[in-house]
Amino acid sequence: MQMLHVFRNTPHGREELLQTAQFCKTMQASPVVYIPEFTKFLLYLDNDVVQVDLDKTFLRSPGTAREHVEEIMAEMDVDNWRFFVPRHFSTPFLPDVPVGFHFMGCPHTIADLRSKAGAGYIGPRIRRILASAAFPLLLFSPVFKPFTRIAVMFGGKANAATALRLAVRLHRLSGLPISMYTAEEGRRSRKYYEKLLSKNALTGVFAQSVSDWQIFPRKEFVENLYRIPHDALVVMGAYGHGTIRQLLMGSTVEIIQAHLPNNLLIAGPHYRGLA
Amino acid sequence: MAFFSRIKQWLGRIFPQGPAGEDRLLLILFGAVVGICSGLAAVALNTSLHGMESFFGQYRYNWWSFLLPGIGAALSSIFLEKIIREGAGHGVPEVIYSVSRHGGLLRMRSTFSRLVSSSLTIGSGGSAGPEAPVVMSGSAIGANIAKAFSLNERHRIALVGCGSAGAVAGIFNAPIAGLVFTIEVIVGEWTALHIVPVAVASVSGAQISRILQGNQIPFTHLHFDVDVITTVAAAGLAVVTAGACILLTRMMRTSHQLAGKVPVPLWTRAAMGGMAVGIIGLFLPQVLGEGYHVIREMVEGSFGGGFSMVLILMLAKILATSLTLGWGGSGGIFAPCLVIGSFAGLMFHRGVDAVLPGFLSVNEGAFALLGMAGMISGMLQAPLTGIFLIVEVTGGYETILPLILVSVISSTVSHAFEPSSFYFRDLVEKGHYLRPRTDAKVLADLRVSEVLEKDCASVPKNMLLGDFLKVVQQSRRNYFPVIDENTGEFAGMIHLDDIRPYLFDNLLHDTVFLEQIMAADTETVDIDDELSDALDWMDASGAYSMPVVSNRRFVGMVSKATLLDRYRKELMLQTTE
Amino acid sequence: MQLSLEELAGCLDTHPDIVLRWIRQGRIPVKRRQDICVFNPEVLEKWAAVNHVSFTPPEKKTRPLLEEKPSGLARAIEKGGIYYDIPGETVSDVLRSAVERMESVAGRRLKDLLLEKLLDRENMMSTGIGSGAAVPHPRSPVRHEADGQPEEQMAVCFLSSPVDWQAVDNKPVFVLFIIVAPTAREHLHLLSRISYCMRDNAFRDLIAGRPDPEDLFAAVSGYDSRLDAGTA
């Protein structure tokens, strides 16, 4: 398993790489570090090509970048990592980054969060990557803090199962305990979600892996986010909603992103499981 | 997304699939839609080009008019790089690259970016043509329509072709040229799956342009009396146009390399190139812009100046084109080629006429026309495109015999000096020129992970030879990866053939560790390496298999045996229609 | 019809990644919803025929012949039986009385055929492997048109008195391990196992003491499980 990390040689970038390193170490994945030479690259996904525009900070002090990466990896005691050097270019200034990775770390500028951090805004680019990528994205926290448990957001018809499957997979890889959080929407009660579990053949997995399940009303969603432990990796699914609905209410991902400082791992509808 | 997939479902119900699950009928419908859209893009470019020309035209007679192409090129570069952030290349090679490697995926922003930037470059006087931008736009329109309906790669490539065909057909009012250019240059696959929708797109693109702009033939001409002498002389002209092609290609390359060495931002570079063109334009205004009016004069036979004047103009146009495109202006090579070609034809006619007065009975306009065909064919090394394009843009079917001759000879001669055409050269150099149904394409499609053999038992490097023999007993393979048991890292390979002499020596069984007899310096391949690289290595070293190692961990083996099996399946799949 | 990606790859006898790519490229009439492949089996079958791809529809799919592990020594001996006090002075006498005693080779004609083949083999070269043991066996599987062929088995026959078998070490033979197997592979398997046992001093001592069936089974099962686990 490999995780793509786009490195920037700044203190923020260091925090991001530390998070990738810890994630990979915990999940037995190997980081693949890309030190960009251009401010943009292309991801050719299954049915979409996404151009990722980086800001100038990613090109800062290229002389020390490799050295810094090596230092951070040594500090985190991660040895199975490597650099990624793009082999194909769509145009001379536009490298292609392959998409055969199992995770991708998502710096804030890709997420376009710096400008709208307060509003809980997931950039359209992230949305598009999520919409067609087979790998989940790890959204970084501003500062590195090791997570010691997994919190899975079990809600939404299609997202719930995806998120739980991913969480269980991570649980098996890392041995970290899972707690599950569900916001009751409308008339959907605990029964409904139990049915959802059995419909997706997840009842057994749930019993084995999930240590605690908290259900709270959707109306108090934001208030109840306090229940999620500060040292948890939050796992959730994201499904493409209609544009209008998004404008009206904002997606759950955005609410969570806005209110939780935790690391956030998001799987899109094409997430294929970890082979 | 849901909206499009619902439409697709609904269409799928109306248009039944073919026996092997082909959506050909559906594809024809999509082809028409894409053709209309890209035809509209062509019309839009044409209109904005004229708008820009008249806007910049009002300053044309000021002393500082030489700045105009510089300003235009700089604006177009700023627009592309800073506003759209396109990371632009020439256009057509990007489309071919995407068709070769990524099933025709193109970015949404490419649907319009080049239209704006090229109308800035060309309208301000830069020496470039509108066809590459419009092909890029059309292809991107096709790709994005395919994306919206989640079509698969084959269909998406067909729609990319539709876009390019509709665009060329629309901009030149030349439906056959659109079809032929697309199949010959963009798609590279002459199969019904592609030809049918592309033809439909060509028709609808040309039709839209006729509805909106009228059915004009760009370069009308007088009637030519083409005789046998003309046909013979065409062979001579072909050599001249081939020479011009080679000169243009090399000038473009040199000027591009030169520009790359200038340590200034891209837009400044473009401005410098444009300014240089503007200075040439002060003396020879004929080289500015797409230059269609010049062609028109030449084809009609009303172009003044002597042999040397035309020669200078031709060289100046070549220089101006390489300055515009090589230094970062945005545009295509078609229109400059047409201009250079007609200069070359005119020059040839006047040269022959000076040496042998009265030998060529036909009007010099006919040679301008033949020169264009020779230049296009030579530059693209696509003779069919040259033939059909010229026949259609001039309506000159009576010149078809010398036209064919000049096209094929010109493209052959320039091929001898420049083995890959202007569009393909970079792609060929980087190994991205992957035509359908070729070995390179099949190999590029197969991934190392797809031919990986995982049933290899690995052995620790501190194992005794005697213990290893028991592993061999249980195994069906000849290759054994050796692992460092402490770190889990790959240490080397043991091939039974290499250690056969030790196998039957009982004394060694308890004294030799695997580490001592393994091949530690084995070449390995990574899981996301290109299969062709692995194959090259196996060929070079005579090996039949090699280990796959990722992040220093052994993953499996690739062997020629499995590869042949998969390769053959893939080849059959890609070549049966 | 719906199958998972892995199942479909199995039907097409190829790698799931390849199927995934074929779907993406539109080379195969299959649609994908996450990991589920949706297709019309008739269309797919036609496609497979046109493109020379092997396709085994899942319902018709015959279970791949499980790499049948040849059964161990213990099972073969259980089948073949253990016999004591086989009379006879010469090789052919001994073999004749042994074959007569073998219960799992039923029918006159099969017994005659087996004996004939065993004698043929002995005439070629002695099967005495030393330490007082011989492994008489037919050179080719015993088969009779009408009576079929006997199952894989090994008959352990202790002789009433040692017989000169012209063994490799010239020691007289006191025990026979008669191997009957339907295929050459199973034959070799049994042969290699018994010769492995006979190289072990403990087993040779056990055999020399003409052990009870229980003891013999226990010992042989021990070797079996060790060899199966690959730890021996």
Image (spheres, coloured by chain):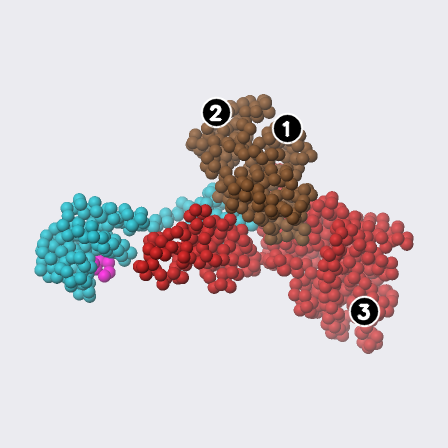
Chain colours: A brown, B red, C cyan
Instruction: Tell me if B223 is positioned left or right of A195 in this view.
Output: right
Q: Which residues are magenta?
A: C137-143
Please report, as a chain letter, where disc 2 is located.
Answer: A
Callout 1–callout 3 Cβ contact below 8 Å: no
Measured in 3D between alpha carbons, the distance from the residue under mark 1 to the one under mark 3, in whole angstroms, is: 70 Å
Task: Tell which tag, 1 or 3, sits nearer the viewer.
Answer: 1
Out of B314 and B234, give the one closest to the viewer: B314
Q: Is residue C139 magenta?
A: yes
How busy is the neighbourhood of tag 1: few (under 14 within 10 Å), some, or many (20 plus)?
few
Residue C1, x across and y down, in percent? 47, 42
The local crowd at label 2, few if under 14, some if 14 to 19, many if 20 or more residues have their Cα within 10 Å, is few
- Given the image, what chain letter belongs to the residue carrying mark 3? B
From the image, which quarter does the C terminus of chain B lie in?
bottom right
Q: Is residue A256 magenta?
A: no
Question: Badge 2 is on which residue?
Answer: A191
Q: Are marks 2 and 1 in contact (CB under 8 Å)?
A: no
Q: Residue furthest right?
A: B62
Residue A196: x percent and y percent?
49, 30
> What element does badge 1 sit on?
helix
Q: Which residue is mark 3?
A: B347
Name the one closer to the observer, A44 or C170.
C170
| Along the viewing direction, whichever of C111 and A23 lies nearer the viewer | A23
Query: Disc 3 marks which amino acid?
Result: Met
Q: Secondary structure at mark 3?
A: helix
For image coordinates 10% across by 61% down, the residue present is C90
Residue holding disc 1: A249
Q: What amino acid type is highlighted by mark number 2?
A: Lys
Position in image of residue C200 (x %, y %): 22, 53
Can residue B375 be seen here? The reply is: no
Tag 1: amino acid: Met
Q: Residue at x 78, y 67 (%)?
A: B344
When asked about the image quadrant of residue B561, the answer is bottom left
